[in-house]
Image (tube, coloured by chain):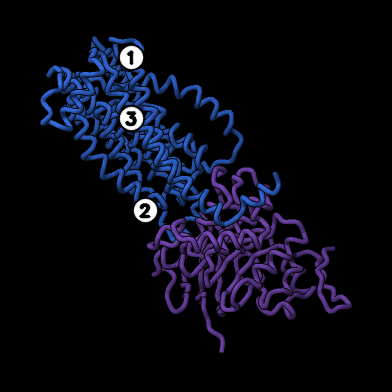
Chain colours: A purple, B blue
Amino acid sequence: MENIILKLNKTRAKFKDSGFHLEINTNINEGETILLIGPNGSGKSTFLKTISGYISLTQGEIILKNKNIESLSVADLSKLISYMPQAPYIPDYFDVFEFVLSGCYSPGKKSADTIDENFEITHKMLNSLKMKHKWSSKIGTLSGGEKQLVLLAHSLVQNSSIQLFDEPSSSLDPYNQSEIIKFILNKNNKKQTKIISSHDLNLSWKFNRVIMLKNGSIFKDGNPEFIMTTKHLSDLFEKNIEVVKLKNNKNIVLYN
Amino acid sequence: MTTKALKKTDLEFIIYNKTTKNKLSIVWLSVALCFLFLLSLFIGSSQISFNEIINSITAFIVPWDTNLTYSDSSYTILFYLRIPRSLLVILTGIILSASGTGFQAIFKNPLADPYLLGVGTGAGLGAILGLTIFNINFIFANLNAAVFAFVGGVFAVFSTFVLSNYSKTNNQLSLILAGVAVTSLFGALTTLLLITQDPDIKPMLSWLLGGFSLSSWENFNIVFIFGFPSLIIIFLMSEKINLLNLDSELISNLGINEGHSIKILIMLSTLATSVAVSQTGIIGFIGLVAPHISRMKWGSNAKYLLPQSSLIGAIILLSSDMIAKTIMSPIEIPVGLITAFLGFPFFVSLLRKESGKNWKI
């Protein structure tokens, strides 16, 4: 019934020379929306970087649509996966429109800025993120939150079938945080697989799957309704965390 | 004001701003360069009248017209000295600026210039080795010395690459550090040779500072044959060069093999720069300043930035050369001095403006 799009077979990877090892064994289905949570240094970013192909594996394999990820070229991989890093370097002298438009780049194809459609896509994306008025601003003049929105736009215009986001809303105000996550999840067709890491635990119930990471491996994995419990969260963060059910049947996470 | 700002966000306006406007700027920069080229033909140490120059050019274009009066010497000076010289100046300006634009993208730092990896001091050392140890007769634009300079430049960048491989942490940062090391070592060796070997270091010094005073078609042809193909490939890579400005994670996610592209670009720039340096000496600041001016004026899209900065570099260098020819006439001063004099205030203002911004390295 469900199509497995990503298969992580005893995947092991390490982040630079930190001595930190990630060890993951799981399947990801087409169209799933997954939230990655876990304490700092638990491997959320490494997990995303590994799937994006930026970090090479030390053991095991990742199967993407029946193909070993390591047999794919950077160019082939880029057509299937988009990845929004946490705080990448963008030169101050790039302007917003140019940067977002560069997301439309596709290796081996016509140059991105010769295609009018790309301008339209970029324009629309900036419009829906309410950043249209900043189109000609230099990146160096943006606030942290605006920069994050622009980066998100750059990632979304790629419209890839697997989309990875590393804390895409961390610099936004609380209202926009939840708005942006909703925006990412509702965007485009249901076949796209989205994996988002975040420290905002209250977002969990918007996703159809939550993966809890601890010390580089999966601690709990499943539907938020079942795994987002007081016990699991307290164990995960080794702190007192409580999940409270409100009258309107919504859940809220309390940090004691 | 606000209605105007709103109107500006129209898609058509954006497309105009991002494409047509840039293309137009390239057209008018080219026109300005052509005009400057023609102007440069009238300037030089020997006095040739305006009419003689016009007549020589007309005679070249319409050889059957026998009513034109001009002397053979004027014709020779024009077609065998001034024209090849100005063309070489233009080509050198283009090579330095295009390489500078590429290097600023690779190293994600707008203060990078084409000599960052040691190509300049390498070429200088090569030329002086040729002069002192192998006893080559050293005059400006001597072709044998040029071979030594070219080999020296390529060797320096090669050494930088080998050195940088000892570090595995950050590709670009280790390249810069290795480049600094190679530059200072080769610079020290050059000075050592200069003060110990040659009693008359004046011609050598002026070579090091760069100049075009004895440029001929031979010099131009050599730079053209080696430099032009590299330039073409660099221009064809412009979209990649644009993306190389970004974080390596973003680059790899867009499907570009960063390490691979960097190597190709450095090889091409090194080939072009060292062949230019071998014929003209070490001309500073052009490769740094030209990309900045065009970025400030028209934005940073490398597809347009490359031609824009190349044209600006050619314009600045051609103007500098005209100043070098005339300012202390009949003595010519090295054009590198002029670009340095022009570049210095620019560089300081840039430093003031840019310090405090975040750069990758």
Q: Can you give x and y, in whole percent of width and height, for residue B150 in the image?
A: 24, 33
Q: Earlier in the sequence, mark 2 or mark 3?
A: 3
Give me the C-alpha separation between circle 2 and circle 1. 45 Å
The mark found on residue B120 in the picture is 3
**Chain ID at mark 1:** B
Please count the marks in the image. Answer: 3
Comparing marks 1 and 3, which lies closer to the viewer? 1
Label 2 or label 1, whichever lies nearer to me, is 1
- Circle 2 — which element? helix
- Residue closest to the eye, B340 or B9: B9
Chain of the residue under the numbered disc 2 shown in the image: B
- Residue at 46 percent of width and 56 percent of height: A113
Compute the Cα span from label 1 to label 3: 26 Å
Instruction: Confirm or deny contact between disc 1 and disc 3 (CB under 8 A).
Output: no
Asked if B134 appears above or below B287 in the picture, the reply is above
Mark-to-mark CA distance, 2 and 3: 24 Å
Is any atom of residue B283 visible in this view?
yes
Q: Where does the image place residue B36, in percent across and percent down from the top left?
A: 35, 28
Residue type, numbered disc 3: Gly
At 75% across and 65% down in the image, what residue appears? A238
Question: Which residue is denoted by mark 1 in the rendering?
Answer: B326
